[in-house]
Amino acid sequence: MLPHAMRSTRPSTYPLATLAKLRRDKVDEAARLLSTATCELERRVAERTRAERRRDDLEREVEGVQRVERDALDRGDLSAADLARADAWGSRVAGERDVLAADAERARTAEQQALDRRDATCVDLRSRRAEARSVDVHRERWEERARNDAEKCEEVESAEAWRPPR
């Protein structure tokens, strides 16, 4: 039997198990945040697409009406009252253009902010994974040392058991 001083004093459970669990929990939390940020980004992309589509639809509609008006003007089919109404219509359309352009710009800004948040959460997740991996690597090394210590103790005990009597 080995004297107490030669036996392994290594604890049987990993001393940083609580830290390892905390790091895994942080990875899970960061993954959930990344998922949320990705969903938010997808929603913002859809909003921007809709805003740009509304703006583009108005532009196509305006171009069609203006083309018809120009053709009528070229043929001489328009009166002074028609031209006055066209001018009022043009002012109203300009206001709508400004509103839709502002909506599209706000949507683009919101999308960029969502993209930035998603990128930041992705970086955070990578960092959390690296932290968790460092504890995992430490645990692997700790377990390897524990196995080596146990083998050494067994070798010493075996050698003492087979030592010839004096």
Image (spheres, rainbow, N blue to C red):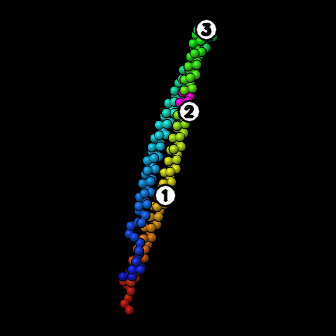
Looking at the image, residue 130 lies above or below residue 155: above
Q: Residue at x 56, y 28 (%)?
A: 101
Question: Residue at coordinates 54% horizontally, 39% vertically from top-left?
Answer: 112
Q: Which residue is mark 1?
A: 131
> Relative to 101, does residue 14 appear above or below in the rendering?
below
> Looking at the image, how many numbered discs can be counted on the residues?
3
**Mark 3 and mark 2: span between their CA atoms?**
37 Å
Q: Nearer the viewer, mark 1 or mark 2?
A: 2
**Camera-side residue: 72 or 124?**
124
For image coordinates 43% across by 47% down, the residue present is 32
Q: Is 96 inside the magenta-drawn segment?
A: no
Residue tagged by mark 2? Answer: 105
Q: Nearer the viewer, residue 91 or 138?
A: 91
Give the magenta-colored segment's residue range: 100-104
- Whichever of callouts 3 and 1 sits on the residue coming sooner in the sequence is 3
Identify residue type, mark 3. Ala
> Element type at marker 1?
helix
Q: What quarter of the picture does the N terminus occupy?
A: bottom left
Amino acid bearing label 1:
Glu
What is the x, y in percent for residue 37? 47, 43
